[in-house]
Each structure stands twice: as C-alpha cells, then as structure tokens.
Amino acid sequence: MSRRHAAIRRARGQWAVEDLGSRNGTRLDGRRLDGTAPLQPGSVLRLGGSLFVLAHRKVQAAALDDSELVGSSGVMDDVRRAVAAVAAHPNSVLLTGETGTGKEVVAGALHRASGRAGRFVAVNCGAVSEGVLESELFGHRKGAFTGAVADKEGLFAAADGGTLFLDEVGEMPPGLQVRLLRVLETRTVRPIGSTRERAVDVRVVAATNRDLVQEVRLGKVRADLFARLNQWPVHLPPLRERREDIPELSRALLARRGEGRALSLGLLEALLVHRWTLNVRGLANVLGVAAIASPADQPLELTEQVAAMLEADRAMAEPVVDPAALMRTMPTVPMVKRPSPTPDADAVAEALRANNGSVAAAARAVGASRQQIYRLIESEGWDLDTFRE
Ligand SMILES: Nc1ncnc2c1ncn2[C@@H]1O[C@H](COP(=O)(O)OP(=O)(O)O)[C@@H](O)[C@H]1O
Ligand SMILES: [Mg+2]
C-alpha cells in the first residue's frame, strides 16, 4: 500500500472511496477504481497487497461458540444469537436459506448447544420415495410389508432424547406430512404394522431452501405442519451477503483437506467478489480445485481451472433464455401446448378458392386447424361465399 493510498469517507449516510493517486492503484469489486466511487456493504477493496470487505454491521461478541460453525460476520452473529437463544427450549426450529449456506452445520451446532443427551439424526425428506421415507422415519414391524424381514427402529426412535434434522422438508409427500404432524403433536410414534405407540422426546429441526410460505399457498405443504415446524425461524444468509467470512471459511475448508497453504492475493480477490450460487459448498469445491491445480509449495492461485469453476458457478445463476432448455429443467410444469403459427392469409385464401370454400379441405391444404381458418375468416372479414364458384 502507498503511504497515502486511498480515502474512505462517509457523506449523507453513504460510504465512498477515493484513490489518492496511489502508486499501484485501488481496485473496487475486482475492477480498477478511477477517482471516487460509492461503497456498499460487501464491497471488496484492494489497496496494494491488502484486501478489505465493507462489513454489513459491526460484530458484537458471539453468543454461540461452535468449532464446526465458522464465520464471525455480523450476519452470522445474528444466526449464532438466534441459535443460542432457542437451544435449551423445546421449540421446533425452521432453518431457511439457499443450498450450501450451512443449514446442516447450524442444525448440528444447535443440537450441541441444546445439551440434549440423545443423538443428532439427519434425514433428507426429498431423497427417497414416500414408502421408504415413512418406514425410515417411523420404523416398521417384521412382516408389515413385503421386504420387512425384521423389526426396524425408525429415525424418530433413534433420535429419542436428541435432535431429528428433517432436511428439504418442503419436499415431503403430502401423505407423510399428516403422519409427521400427528407424531409432533402426540409425541408418540407407531411403527408401520404395529398397534402400539411409543413415546418419543425429539427436538425437531427442519430445513428448506424453498419459500415455505409460498409452498403452503400452493398447497404443497400443509399449513398446520408449517406452523408446527416454524416455532423458531432462523434464516441463513447467502455467502454473498457475508463476504467478510470468506477468508476464515477458506482457511477452515482447506484445513479439512489437510491443506495449510495461503491464498494468493489474486485468488482471494476473485473469491471475495464472486456471487457464490452454491454458497459455502461451492467455495469448498473451488478451493479443492485450487489446492490440486496450484504448484506445490506455492500459495493457492487463480489458475485456469479455478477460473472455469467460478465461471460455471456464475453461469448457474443466469436466467435461462432458451425456452426449450427451460422446459427441460422444469419437468414438473405441465407441458403447455404450443400454439401453431397463424397460417398465412394469402395462402389460406388461395386454398379456400381451390377447395370451393371448404374450410376442412383448406385447413388440410395449409396444415392448420379448422378453428384457425375460422378465426382468420373472421379477422379478415371474409365471406365464404366469395370463394365458391
Ligand atoms: N458456517 C460454516 N462453517 C463451516 N463449514 C460450513 C459452514 N457453512 C457451510 N459449511 C460447509 O459447507 C457445506 C454445505 O453445508 P450444509 O450445511 O450441508 O449446507 P445446506 O444444508 O444449507 O445445503 C458443508 O461441507 C459444510 O460443512
Ligand atoms: Mg443440506
């Protein structure tokens, strides 16, 4: 950094940065700064060899200390506080946030902070069929259905005294939602094929990357189940709203792979300014590529492979413009019959004349439907008689 490199000022509630004619320049969000520019929370500044992120808020003392949960930004501090506040209470907790924002990590931290002696048991409600999920959750008796060769304890029973994490809860089939609600209300489970109920003491933590209120309105999630799960909502902000956590998260994610090397300035800047469609999971992937692609005994670099990973992650967030591709990515949307193009009026007039005013024959001749021909006759104000001999 130059001795007088740049100035950061606040005027009328807005932060701004000005380069003071520094020797090697100032970069803002990955681009060279010319003169003065406004700063927003999350803005990434590079002054010489130092990187800065304008934090969203001042960080207060963290209320929850969990070695698995990394990140000390102000917004993560909110998450820690919310988790610490509810931990000892029996409330069901609903974790919302984009994919890869750490919902499962937070669920684990919540379980540890709860002091509950039982196990932490996780189940993905969207990954298996309704029948399999039902017997996974509630268990079954031997012989309850074909293939039930022995009694099986369900995950509710396994989590007795502990925490059951229901991941992707918005994808739970409607039939099971009713059963789940019953279990949550009566605090008892009855395995499939059994006539006995068993009392369970389970703290439920549910997670979703969908807008559950919207899912309730669409009739996909029962309102009564939503109410039973949403007794303490915690939202996990996307990584792009807490860029200041990226250096710390990167160190932790690399340490998990036994990687202790530092990041080059160029790589760190690229990570800081990226939009992170896949959030922390995406960051872990990119770092995994950087660790392999960078020369040994050197800081991790922004190699071609790393740049390609970042580009793929970025492209994922782009709106799909090709309607055919859009249809392919949305198999659940009922196929809308594409209207055939309106037949050419001149060609239809000629076909009507050639077929003595027969609409059916003219329609066949131009490859249109009869309705389309009638519509055209109406819109053109034709009299069918004029096409007859
Ligand atoms: N705050 C965090 N601290 C440490 N690791 C994290 C954090 N958030 C996410 N991760 C890591 O990122 C990956 C995705 O996290 P996960 O909890 O599975 O996300 P989600 O359930 O929201 O899709 C996991 O490998 C997890 O360990
Ligand atoms: Mg997950």
Image: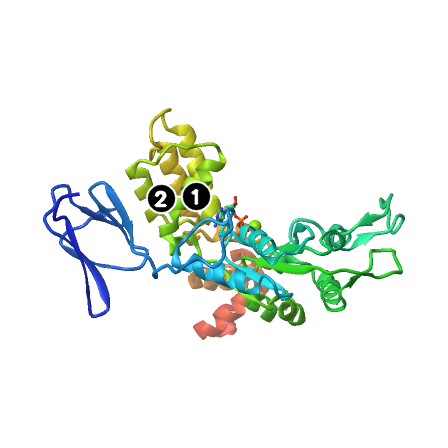
Amino acid type of the residue that numbered disc 1 sits on in the rendered structure: Leu
Residue sitting at x 37%, y 28%: 294
Residue sitting at x 83%, y 52%: 140
Is the residue under label 1 in contact with that under label 2 (CB below 8 Å)? yes
Amino acid type of the residue that numbered disc 2 sits on in the rendered structure: Leu
Residue 299 location, quadrant: top left
* Image quadrant containing the N terminus: top left
Residue sitting at x 33%, y 33%: 301
The CB of the residue at mark 1 lies under 8 Å from ligand 1: yes
How far across and how far down the image is residue 270, in percent? 32, 43
Query: Which residue, as the protein is rendered here, is positioned at the far left?
Result: 21
Crowd class of label 1 (few under 14; some 14 to 19; many from 20; radius 10 Å): many
User: Image check: 330 left or right of 157?
Assistant: left
Crowd class of label 2 (few under 14; some 14 to 19; many from 20; radius 10 Å): many
Residue that label 2 marks: 271
- Decide which of 311, 55 is in the foreground and name it: 55
Residue that label 1 marks: 283
How many numbered marks appear? Answer: 2
User: Image check: 358 left or right of 224?
Assistant: left
Query: Which residue, as the protein is rendered here, is positioned at the far top?
Result: 296
How far across and how far down the image is residue 105, in percent? 54, 50
Q: Earlier in the sequence, mark 2 or mark 1?
A: 2
- Decide which of 353, 340 is in the foreground and name it: 340
Location of residue 133 with respect to 221 vertically, above or below: above
